[in-house]
Image (cartoon, rainbow, N blue to C red):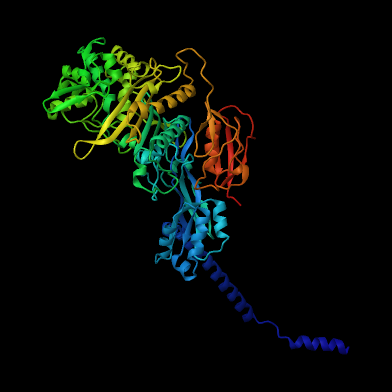
Amino acid sequence: MSEKRGNIMRKNLIPAPMASDMRAVGVRASLVGAAICAALVGAGVKATRLATVEHEAYAEQGNRQQLRSFKLAASRGEIVDRDFMTLAVDDRVHKIAINPRLVRARGAEEALIEAVLEIEPDESADYLREEIAKDKAYRLLRLPLSDAQMAALQGKGIPGVSFEPSTARVYPRGLLASHVLGRVGAQGSGTAGVELGLDMQLRGREALSPAYFAAGKKLLVDGVPDPGVARGDTVVLTIDSQIQAMVEEEINTLVRQWNPVGTSILVLDPRNGEILAMANRPTYDPNHPVERAHQTQNLAVQAAYEPGSTLKAVTVAAALELGAVRENETFYCEKGRWKYTPRNTIHDAHPAEWLTVTEILAASSNICTTKIADRLGKQTLSKWVKKFHFGERPGVQLPGATAGLLAPPEKWSDIQMANISFGQGMAASPLQVTAAFAALANDGVYHDPTIVQKILDARGGSVWEHAPEGERLVRSATAKTVMRMLEDVVHTDLGTGENAHVDGYRVAGKTSTAQKAGNKGYADGMYYASFIGALPARAPRVVILVSVDVPEGAHYGGDVAAPSFARLGAQLMTHLGVPRDDGKTPPPPKPVVVAAKQMAASLGVLADIDVEPSLPGTDERGSGAAAHPKVTTGMPDFTGLTLAQALDLAGRAKVELRASGSGVAVSQDVAPGQVESGRVVQVAFAPKK
């Protein structure tokens, strides 16, 4: 009972809820609900406003904060030879960035210089000291480094030294055709040769794509830009690298023997004007700094000399074409000395009495050539010299090509007309002389010389292609007659070019020995010796000019230049597979060096070992087979090669390489071994670890 009473008492102590309290709770709940609803409505209104009225303003603000342009840097197009062998290509390298103030503050000047010279002994120590001495916090050195070279320098821990990724223009063949290729300057533009002449075609352009950047990462809006948009065009030259290598080897022999001031050799196809080879000395390696400016001068195109006796062929061709002389007509050559004017006497190096027109060319008589020119007169001779394109700039795609020098006939004195008939009193480049002679070798049809065969875009489509347009200068019969006459220059005892004889082939050619002009008339003991000829004489495949400026020890073109023509001509006939005139089987071709070191190939068949010159983007000491791959006649092993090396190797192996990524090759979808020509191989590249 007591427990029951206690429960009743406790219940009585708890007051019963009042009606007013219940109403207060309801009010508060309503207010909270209303506030929540109002907030939701406000948020909805704000969201609607942001999505409609203020959308563009906020989107623009967000883009300013996060949207950037992803840049795909422009890459320069390749330069390849007529067989698509790479001659110039962009490669990925590293550049040394230094803080000169920090280097000096830490006393690391000599350590840096020593480390750089250890990697590249050809670099200038004076240049490095000048850069370190500058009162700057940042300098980018010109020396490109491979991955291995960068790692070696980085491992030395020199203070104030860092590295930046870069690209470098690489010339895998070193000196080969350097004057044709030219080089690229520090700003990425061509400064000489084809690099300058076709700079606009070779130069790529930057490709941009919008991308959002956040937390150091990017999201491309429109995908990765097409690399083809950023890449320049590919320039395909008319140069044959194997013929060029033969020419380079022969010109070195010529320099060692005669020690001239300068020399040039040209090989041209007379059927279409295509230049197969062009070499000069002095020369330079476009991969390295040039020591002297004159090394870069393309003497074959930019220098002008008196063409000398080579022009006698033009004088005779004009006279035969006009009927001013007959092939078998004889002229009295005054026994080698003729007083042409009261003040001027013309001399012959080989005195003679009566000579036919053919013998005049063979003996290279100045006197009788002048007598032939007298029948033409000043105006007519001038017209015909111009008709053979002397006095005008050739249309070759090389900058700085000279037009030579040819005065108008109104300004000719009597002796000047005589001089011009045998190639003095005027000036022309070796290329002009070669192109003019090639017209006679091509049945009287002239082709403007060209160094570019075609230009291709990044996808391989044709942008431009050389389409030869011949210009007839003389009748075919006249040209054949002159060429037959010029055979006697080489193949008779009277001729001055017997040293140009090529075993098994008839040669039509002409010697020239032109005395060089000085400050007062002609300079004693200074001559320009040359020989130009066509092989084979009756159906010429090549015209070869060998020119030598001030040789030591001899000065006649037949003694100095003709032997080089003979050696080179024999190699070219074998290389081109031209049947011998005597019907005998030609000897097998010899290996041809087509790189600065020992890379050999003959008749398009690659040798077993391919050793190329060290490049700015490669490690000369390499890593065995990766640096100097063994080449088969099938699919090569690209593993470990840089993009430049892989592209070059693919070109020579006649397979099509399609690359992805950057760095060194890590995989390929076609295994090394025998494959059909033109096989496509996908090669993946990745940064070297």
Q: Quadrant of the N terminus?
A: bottom right
Q: Can residue 201 be seen from the camera position used here?
A: no
Identified at 62% across, 37% down, the residue is 669
Question: As drawn, is 87 to the left or to the right of 27?
Answer: left
| Picture layout, residue 13 above or below residue 417 | below
| Picture layout, residue 416 above or below residue 298 | above
| Picture layout, residue 486 above or below residue 266 | above
Question: As drawn, is 18 to the left or to the right of 246?
Answer: right
Measured from the top left, where is residue 432 in percent x and y? 30, 29
- Residue furthest out toward the right: 1
Q: Quadrant of residue 29?
A: bottom right
Measured from the top left, where is residue 595 in percent x and y? 50, 37
Q: Quadrant of residue 684?
A: top right
Identified at 46% across, 64% down, the residue is 99
Numbered marks: total: 0
Measured from the top left, where is residue 477 in percent x and y? 30, 11
Q: Nearer the viewer, residue 21 or 603?
A: 603
Q: Can residue 491 be seen from the camera position used here?
A: yes
Q: Nearer the viewer, residue 389 or 14?
A: 389
Measured from the top left, where is residue 571 in percent x and y? 47, 25
Q: Nearer the viewer, residue 8 or 657?
A: 657
- Residue furthest out toward the left: 342
Question: As drawn, is 93 to the left or to the right of 12?
Answer: left
